[in-house]
Amino acid sequence: MGISLSGTWVTCTIMPGNHGKPINTKNMKMRFLLFILLLAATSFKPEIVIKSKFKEDTVKTSFVSPVYSELPIGAVKPKGWLLHQLQIMRDGTTGHLDEVYDKVKNSNGWLGGSGDGWEETPYWLDGAVPLAWLLDDKQLQKKVLQYINWTLDHQRLSGYFGPITQAERDKELSVSKETCLQGEDWWPKMLMLKVMQQYYTATGDPRVIPFMKSYFAYELEVLKTCPLGKWTEWAQSRGSENILMAQWLYGITHDASLLELASLLESQSFPWSSWLGNRDWVINAAAHQNRENWMHRHGVNVAMGIKSPALNYQRTRDQAYLQQLKTGFNDLMTLHGLPMGIFSADEDLHGNDPVQGVELCAIVESMFSLEQIIGITGDVQYMDALERMTYNALPTQTTDDYNAKQYFQIANQVQVKRGVFSFSLPFDRQMTNVFGMRSGYTCCLANMHQGWTKFVSHLWYGTVDRGLAAIEFAPCELITAVGKDSTKVLIKEVTNYPFGQDINFEVTTDIDVNFPLQVRIPSWCREAALLLNGALLRKENGGQMAVVSRFWKNGDKLTLQLPMEVRISEWGRNSRAVERGPLVYALKLEEQWEMGHEKTEGDYWCVYPQSEWNYGLIQKAVQKPDELMEVREVRPVTADFVWNLSHAPVVITTSARKIPAWQLVNDVAPLPVTDRNGLYKGTVSNTVEKITLVPYGCTKVRIVAFPVVP
Ligand SMILES: [Zn+2]
């Protein structure tokens, strides 16, 4: 990569551990008590973590500081419906997976047991850890700390960490740099590093940084002997997760060997940057669903891989990577994109036909990748993409109580049931589309917890000029330090977004403080208005960050108004979708839920529509949606809002006609062939009917990509 690396190696402090022997819980408790006392003695507060923001690079490298820096977990507190969403998760599987799910429950490898020690426990922690601190839930903190403490306490002297390996058990050894072959898969450790990073920003636990330093030193020394692909192709597919954490630590320590490690990891990972930039990859993925190189187009691998060019740019300052990212992301969404803002992934990329499926992991991993890409690039396009994915694709795929999920959702999902549908991975038991705790492959049950939690912690970012940026909008409160004197401010964000157009930012501060406040004007918004204390400040076009820089006083209120017009977008099979603001709207179909039981995968639910779904939108309404589609606010957005039909706050009514020939084929509803205007030329019903559309995220069965009829 052409980087000159002249930094010196930092000697690592290795936490004393018992290295593979049974856990001494008394000793562990003592150590934790000491840690608490240490925190109390130094009056440690989470704000101190603000220091961990990327500083100016003092070592001469090409490293690029992020445009927007992440705030520590806990700086942003969810409020209103978003708080309720997290409380539901705490009361459901996010808070209790270790009690109800055998892989996490039974002699867990991440607690020293001989049970599962692969990806699912760290997947769960990756969402449960931020949740525990976002809600300041002591019980959940205590629960997740067991895994964190075990992992920290059992790091080997070499720096290696994770569940006791088979070789360590059999030969009573401890994995060393000389015996890396006795180690195991690199992949689950990448996840645990993400867990540790979040835990660190939430608590400032001084054990975390030395732990990471030691592990990265181990990696740097042994990767030539035990490369990423040594044990599984998953580690090669997902090297970006490891690179991200090495570069995050570099932002704190400025130890150049971490950039050397990141380059080495990149050289051993799938080359996502060139694949995304060179286009053949994405075209081939649209054309082929065979066994050849299927890991290259596995949707969750792609979701993690899209951050790879941004990370390479951060490390090398080479702008070509940003172009590769842009080309690749646009190609991905053109060839495989679906109206709810995500690409098909059932499990593989599978084209843009609205009957294709999406794995829940592909959504939450894409969200996380975008959250990283946004910080590094500051590009509004990716902020808009994150919003679309979060407020449309994400909410529909879990049940109200957060105890069941679909492995694959379908855009035009006219029924939820057992079947093979149009998926590239139908599985023998045909359980990939139903709602269940253990249905489909169980990665999503473990991984789905990071979606909402990380969205909360990425609503706001810090700016390089010591200001703040409201990147995504939702009811929340932010407490952080701003301005040249690090003045503490509280900003209350009061809004009904994504359903309502006004977002109010109310500033509380002890003293007047000068700092820039940036707010995103989404690309879907033609013209936004900014009001300061009720008076119009200025108007701004969509697709940019607006900056309000001033001395902010206690009680100041900035209002962002984002007028939400109804508009029409075009999707696969020349279909049309109805949108308003950040939300895509889908045909409202009353639901009939039916419970079933499968002996291996347990209880599950099917959902059937209570009325017909085969409607085409009337052409006139599609041409003049603002005039002929009526928006009604039918109920307030209350603090107990749940993403379901009965809570849908906004509906759109419009005219439609039935297409009698549009029927189920192999359990899906393949769109009828239309002309260039999307117009269906076959027989349609004489009767014009009023149909109701509701936010996609509130539906379980629906049509979202419509044909057009005369
Ligand atoms: Zn999954």
Image (spheres, rainbow, N blue to C red):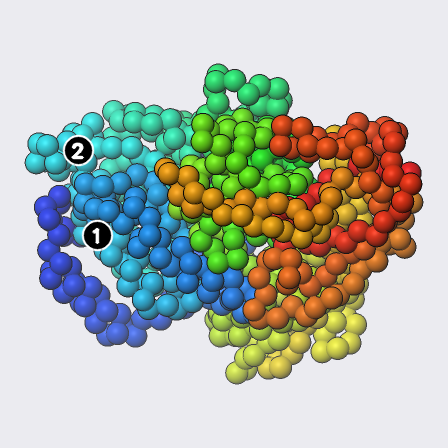
Camera sees residue 318: no
Task: Name the residue at 42% across, 67% down.
Answer: 135
Q: Position of residue 78 (x, y in %)?
A: 51, 66
Residue shown at 66%/41% (left/top)?
A: 414
Dot 1 falls on a residue whose secondary structure is helix
Q: Nearer the viewer, residue 498 or 678?
A: 678
Image quadrant where one finds the N terminus: top left
First-in-chain label (2 vs 1): 1
Left or right for 540, reference 701: right
The residue where tag 1 is placed is 150
Q: Is mark 2 within 8 Å of ligand 1?
A: no
Percent position (x, y) of residue 385? 63, 46
CA neighbours of label 1 inside 10 A, class few (<14), some (14 to 19), many (20+): many
Q: Which mark is residue 166?
A: 2
Q: Is residue 669 above or below residue 293?
A: below
| Residue drawn at x 87%, y 29% as measured from the top left | 682
The residue under label 2 is which amino acid type? Gln
Image vertical order of residue 400 relative to residue 260, above or below: below
From this view, report whether residue 374 is shown above or below residue 158: below
